[in-house]
Image: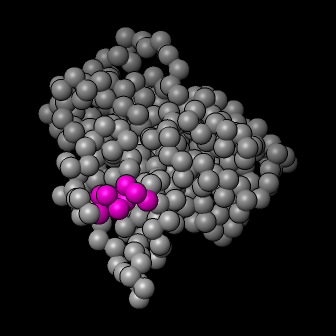
Amino acid sequence: MYNISIAAKLSGVPEIRIRTWESRYSVITPERSSSNQRIYSETDVEKLKLLNTLTTTGYRIGNLVNLSSDELLALVSKPLLNDIVPGNNQANVLTEKHQQIIDESITAISIYDDRKLYALLSNASVDYSQQELIENIVVPLIEKIGELWMEGKLRVSHEHFSSAVIRKLMANLSDGYAIPDTAPNIIIVTPEGQYHELGAVIAAAHASSCGWRTTFLGVSLSAEEICNVLQLIKSKVVLLSIVYPNDDASLNSQLVRLRELSGKGIHIIAAGNAVDGYLPALKKISAHISTSPGHFIKILESIRKKINPNNA
């Protein structure tokens, strides 16, 4: 339970705005202490974070007041175009075959044919290396879906549908590698306030293809929770997928907190379209910054030599 000043700091919403939202829109109904002070729960803070993210990207608070936290989260997760990780996609030259697979995938998505879409991507995973699959098919497909959504040619349901199929494919690819218990482990997660997970799932598949054991923790986890897992499974590496938004003030303090709790021996990798918004904090904590899927692999190779030189 938090007082209003702590709730404001954690959520990124100024105290005066919290009070205004409460009195004018009743978006939050905090409890009261014995001295009649506002007391906010963890759930209240999470809702304030979602509202802050949405209002800073153009949504009007009046249009959000009747939405549940799950509905707000769905809106935050909406712009699939931004969900590309690790790193900013570099311009790749697509072959005619790459483009054909993408076009056929879009057709399957438009009619919600999950079997056809999965078959197209699964067959491509056999024909191409995983890096080529991700860089020349999966990422351009995600970009195309986002473009068509912005043009009104695809619906939000098409985005969610295709995202689910891609997640399934990436998870199956990750599970398909016979990785020994002696292999290094990497934790993959989005930090607190980051709700886009598709890119992190892709990163997990990428790491698995390089012989890493991966522990995927999902979205919006605090520095304390991430460090708890690092200690429990004795991992030396964590990838932070930072996709959207790129201006969350509370994330900067979370990054510093992560380094303070984890210590200098932990390698922190940051990747995603919103990384540039947090460069000062990332440099302060000596994070490795991935600029492309290929660069991500090189970072993993370098770290592996440092933490396990005899079996790199």
As rendered, which of 268 and 110 lies closer to the eye?
A: 268
**Res 289 quadrant in image:** top right
Answer with left or right where residue 72 lies relative to residue 126: left
Could you say which is closer to the camera, residue 238 or residue 220?
220
Residue at point 35%, 38% (across, down): 57
Q: Where is residue 175 in the image (x, y as percent from the top left)?
A: 49, 51
Seen at 51% across and 66% down, the residue is 6
Magenta: predominant secondary structure element? helix
Whether residue 90 is visible to the viewer of this picture, yes or no, is yes
Between 37 and 138, the residue placed more toward the observer is 37
Queried whether the magenta region covers residue 227, the answer comes back as no
Q: Position of residue 254 (x, y in %)?
A: 60, 55
Q: Is residue 32 left or right of residue 227?
A: left
Q: In this view, does 151 lie to the left or right of 102?
A: left
Magenta residues, as a range? Answer: 15-22
Quadrant location of the C terminus?
Answer: top right
